[in-house]
Amino acid sequence: MTVAYQRSYIFREMGHAKSHMIEATSTVPVTFSFAGGLVEEVVRHEMERSAGGAGGDARATLAGEYRRLLDGIYILSGEARLVAAQRIHQQFFGRLGWTEFFATEFRDILPMVTAAWVGKAERDEGCFVDERRRLQVRLRRTRFEDREGLARFLRHEKMHAADILDPEFGYRNETVDEPTRIRYATLWCTSIDERLKGASLEPVTHDGLLQRARSLSRPKCPLCSLPTVHWGEVRDAAMTDWLRGQFAGWSPDQGLCERCLEWAEVNAA
Ligand SMILES: [Zn+2]
Ligand SMILES: [Zn+2]
């Protein structure tokens, strides 16, 4: 089983993907495709608000046109009506500026991916890249109510995708324990926020993040507070008493690291 750091179900099988992530970029420009369900919900919601007066006169006119077009396809039945409705929603999605919005926000990474898709988030929202360098942007409908907020959200999410696509970052899948996975995700997000603020110029790599995540996940020695792999064992009562005398509140069941034990053995002698 492999465990991915950000979202466990999308980066599966990326383990040995490093070599083909360096592939030359495609010469055919990738454009976004948009999932019909999400497009319809976004357009419907935005047009209903515009019909109610939000967004001014131009928007109200657009909402009127939308309404008339939808009314016009009611003479169609079944499949034909669904197809016609879908076409209207895709068209209005573009006229509301969303097609352009995504093309602009992702301009810098589109040349690095083989496909790009925007759809509705079932569980996790965000940007995902699979082993074939296909980009998926998953969003809830409500995100579309605030363009500025959505742009800010995507600038962060897009960096996760950009890192995965960057051979220098060196992303790969590995099995890690849950605390490490969570810390890795947190450290990764923090590093993205720092880079977006221009605060960090240090190169961020998968290995670097993982190393930090691993060391932070380790339990700490109660005496020296350092993350610890090798634990010592206090074997006699005299040593326990001596340590208790040195460290108020310490008890043998809390343990101590090997280095602290060595130090104690030298000093208690
Ligand atoms: Zn993040
Ligand atoms: Zn220690």
Image (cartoon, grey):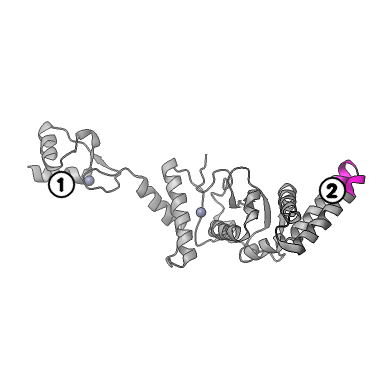
Q: Nearer the viewer, residue 241 or 49?
A: 49
Q: Nearer the viewer, residue 92 or 28?
A: 92
Q: Is residue 181 magenta?
A: no
Residue 265: image quadrant is top left
Where in the figure is residue 204, as x and y percent of width and height? 45, 61
Q: Identify the mark nearer the N-term, 1 or 2.
A: 2
User: Ligand 2 within 8 A of label 1's CB?
Assistant: yes
Residue 150: image quadrant is bottom right
Where in the figure is residue 163, as x and y percent of width and height? 53, 59
Where in the figure is residue 47, as x and y percent of width and height? 75, 54
- The stretch in magenta equals 73-81
Distance in Å between CA atoms under marks 1 and 2: 76 Å
Please, is residue 268 above or below residue 44 in the view? Answer: above
Q: What kind of secondary structure does the magenta stretch mostly adopt?
A: helix
Give the amino acid type for the residue marked by disc 1 in the picture.
Trp
Please, is residue 226 above or below residue 236 in the view? Answer: below
* Residue receiving disc 1: 263
Residue 136 shows in the view: no
| Residue sitting at x 50%, y 48% | 5
Q: Which mark is residue 83?
A: 2
| Residue sitting at x 77%, y 59% | 60
Q: Nearer the viewer, residue 158 or 37?
A: 37
Image side of residue 88 versus residue 184, left or right: right
Q: Which mark is residue 168?
A: none
Residue 99 shows in the view: yes
| Residue sitting at x 47%, y 64% | 195
**Image quadrant containing the C terminus:** top left
Q: Comparing marks 1 and 2, which lies closer to the viewer?
A: 2
